[in-house]
Amino acid sequence: MGQLRRRLTFALGIYAIVTVVFAWIAGDRLNGHTMNNHFAIQAELWKQGQWSMTEEDIAGRHRRREVDMGNDWAVVRKTDPVTHKVEARYFNSFPVFPAVLMYPFVSMAGSALMFRDALFVVALAGLAPALLFLAMERLRDQGRSGRTEKEHAFLALLYAFGTVYFFSSVQGTVWFAAHVVAAVLTGGFLLACFHADKLWACVLAGVLVGCGYHTRPPFLLAAGLFAFEAARASLRDGAVEGEGLIAQLKGAVGRLDKKAVLLRWAAFGVPVLVAIGISFSINKARFGDAGEFGHTLLNVVWMERVKRYGLFSYHYLSRNLHCAFTLLPVINPENAPPHVGRVQFSGMGMAMWVTTPVLLWLLWPKKEQRALQLALWAAALPIALQDLLYHSAGWVSFGYRYTNDFAPYLFVLLAVTGVRFSGLFKAAAAWAVAINLFGAVSFQRKGYEKYYFLQTYSVPVYDGTPSLQSATFAPD
């Protein structure tokens, strides 16, 4: 009991530190609602028994500067067969679990206008690193992480302040709110996975994946981690330690309690299947098609290419790989005009190794907990691949913001791979905190515009028709 109390005290301390810093950096954003508070508006619409707004309603909100009606709303236009009048309905097309969380608070506030969504997101954000710490500590209990309590706390705080999670958490707007909610769910999912020997944790893991699917759909692809942990928990006489990976796997097959593992997988799978079924019902209710999630109906300038290639395509891979792995800040000439910063960041973000260079240490892991390492990679890589095939790289962003989808798994990998926290590692960690602090302070903040270039241009595409493109680098 004493150890549990100490561990929870550490987690509470991490939450408190992160929340205070995030609130300080968010500053005046906490005083009111954001201009892209889709989830809060969705909660308000539910209170009214609706899924959507009329064009007159959202246009009125837009005129009163309550919302940006031109940014990521799914628009459905229908023509009345009698009057031939065209009616437009505006839907929030983002998965709705964050709106579920906001609903009671929006109801108490009275409307989305009165609800401070950025404050809500900041208050929630500290839970992710706190849960990540508890998940790593669970691995220490199992002998699968050789880190100390303080080292786990260090990694949890580095995750909070040394990744794109920092700038994402202080925005409050719909895109970043979803990342924060998903990160909190991921922390809980990791903790539940590492308790897979308990049936209640299996159910909880499934519920969290279902909620994650209704927040950031790639979340679903991490289910393989639970499958591994459930199988490990179902081995007779426990897991084989200290042998080679192949020997471990061969030994595990013969000692697997098939009835136990199937029960654990079923306890996990039922909530996930229910969540998927609910999403189909929501799509049917909104758009008349269970397979239509709404993102092909968005009122954004990139929809022409989505119509051509789809939401996910190999066509987007090369540009997204550039954004994730090779996109660097631009160093402008010394004679740059006053409104142009000496250093500028693309609206497409920066390479992950620039914002979080400690991730490079994962390229040289020690041969410890190889099976767990593979399971964690099996969770992170499919999510990353789906993000890399997506039609958008996250415009507009300080760093490659889709790193939020899989970064918690990478930080657990840092804990279990046994990499040494050398002076060079600590220097990389200090750089990560410094550059992400600048992003959190400056991104989309008045007075820092000169450090960002947000450019688009129109060029002919393969068939000669003009197409709008977003720039990833500054012009010569």
Image: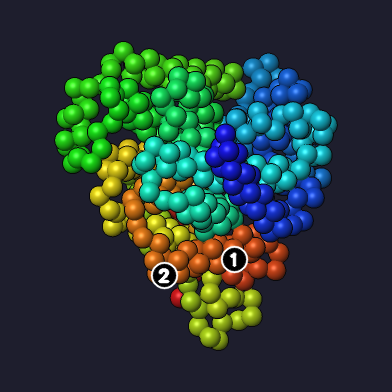
Which color scheme is applied? rainbow
- Classify mark 2: helix, strand or loop: helix
Q: 310 or 332, which lies in front?
A: 332
How many other residues sit within 10 Å of disc 1, few (<14), some (14-19) or many (≥20)? few
Earlier along the polypeptide chain: callout 2 or callout 1?
2
Quick check: can you spot residue 171? no
Count of numbered circles in the view = 2
The image shows residue 381 at horizontal and vertical percentages of 35, 43
The image shows residue 111 at horizontal and vertical percentages of 80, 33
Residue at image location 75% in from the left, 50% down from the top = 30
Q: Is residue 137 left or right of residue 339?
A: left
Q: Quadrant of the N terminus?
A: top right
Q: Amino acid at mark 2?
A: Gly
Residue at image location 28% in from the left, 47% down from the top = 368
Quick check: can you spot residue 37? yes
Q: Residue furthest bottom?
A: 335
Q: What is the quadrant of residue 294 in the picture?
A: top right
Q: What is the quadrant of residue 97 in the picture?
A: top right
Q: 119 or 288, which lies in front?
A: 119
Residue underneath mark 2: 423
How many other residues sit within 10 Å of disc 2, few (<14), some (14-19) or many (≥20)? few
Residue underneath mark 1: 438
Q: Is residue 94 left or right of residue 33?
A: left
Residue at image location 62% in from the left, 71% down from the top = 450
Residue at image location 47% in from the left, 42% down from the top = 137
Q: Is residue 84 left or right of residue 434?
A: right
Q: Amino acid at mark 1?
A: Phe
Q: 107 or 65, which lies in front?
A: 107
- Classify mark 1: helix, strand or loop: helix
